[in-house]
Amino acid sequence: WPKGIITLGPGESARQVVLKKIQELSDLDHRDPFMVADLGILASRHQVFCQALPRVSPFYAVKCNNSPWVLRVVAALGTSFDCASQVELKQVLSLGVAPSCIIYANPCKPVSYLQYAARHRVQLQTFDSEEELTKVAQHHPKARLVLRLWTNDRESTFPLSAKFGASLEVREHLLKSARDLGLAVVGTSFHVGSSCQNPQKFTQAIANCRRVFEMGRGVGHDMSLLDIGGGFPGEEGSKPEFEKMARVINAALAQHFPEETGVEVIAEPGRFYVASVCTAAVNIIAKKAVLEPGGYRKLLYYINEGHYGTFRVFLREPVPRTPIVVKEFCSEQPTFPCILYGPTCDAGDKLFMDEVQLPELDVGDWLIFPSMGAYTSVMSSTFNGFLPASIHYTMEPALRSLLETAP
Ligand SMILES: Cc1ncc(COP(=O)(O)O)c(C=O)c1O
């Protein structure tokens, strides 16, 4: 069993592990940033997903967090996978996952990746253009194709439709082209945008899929798979509530794809599974105080993780996150508007466009950011020579037993 995994003792939490590590590093005067991943959260998120959407099989979106431990746990839970590239396909196949449990859900694929998918019998894949069909006919003629549809995702925090999705006008043409090339279209997919703010977007998209199913059948395709993509909220308690979203989705499925149609429904959740898994602990490495016009005090904190590391996603979030300050004060402290800068020499390396309110802190103090599991370490670089935050994985004994006995 690898040494890197921390098995939690009775009653011990991942948050306690974070605090213990902070203490250890501070004692050594070696305050590098780190993350603690609570892998047990994956099991509870999986359970919540399956209970709320009983007809929908989750294909975990590897792009969101591709840590080998996350993938191993997700596979042991019996989840299938959504891969975006050859490296992701390879990673998932190397876990022993059957090719039939993978969807290659990137509508624009390099030829060599398509050939790789063909060689490894990964058949299910999305497309949204005529050019892709030409490539598929030549390099992966046995593919089971899923037509990705454009959706109105303007209300999502991270829209995707500017780049992907076939528009209404070209759908029938694409279905006919696929047929004429001898390719099998088996269903449709969409993505309402990551961190979708309006559950009704699923209703509209599912209704559109029903029309395209009819179109597909009309031109001779055996339409049997509906892929409702990702877009589910990341953290427990975030708005809109997942349970409410699930009710809306279940109602749309019942209306447009009732169970007796036998249509298989899958989804590609990413942040829903992993957002809450990781907690980041970072340190203040430098500080400046400036006086703003009007005489009020503003603090600039330079911390050892930033936009080029784990926190790239922050600049695209609408509201800055306020970190937890790891410091005991003997009395209530006033707070100041603060800018949080990352460690590199780029002035654009800041965590948020807006200020956050924090008390006066010192160099060497720690900040904790919970819910750092989605689109964080996967996006980090070593710009300016700053290494990515190390990750410590924790799990409870029950999960450990599940992994040890998993095939
Ligand atoms: C095709 C596809 N599927 C699934 C996802 C995962 O989305 P989310 O993390 O919102 O669940 C993404 C995210 O970009 C995606 O592009």
Image: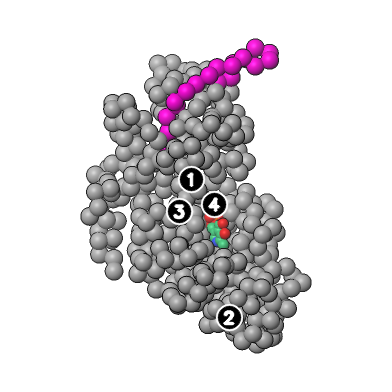
Give the spatial CA distance, label 4 vs label 1: 22 Å
Q: Which mark is residue 65?
A: 3
Q: Is residue 99 visible?
A: yes
Q: Which residue is mark 1?
A: 380
Please name the amino acid that badge 4 sits on.
Pro
Q: Which residue is mark 2?
A: 138
Please name the amino acid that badge 1 sits on.
Ser
Q: Nearer the viewer, residue 302 or 148?
A: 302
The N terminus appears in which quarter of the rendering? bottom left
Up-down relation of residue 300 to residue 199 (above or below): above
- Foreground mark, 2 or 3, reads 2
Q: Residue furthest top?
A: 295
Assign a secondary structure to mark 3: loop
Q: Nearer the viewer, residue 219 or 63?
A: 63
Q: Residues within 10 Å of mark 3 (few under 14, many from 20)?
A: many
Q: Main secondary structure of the magenta part?
A: strand
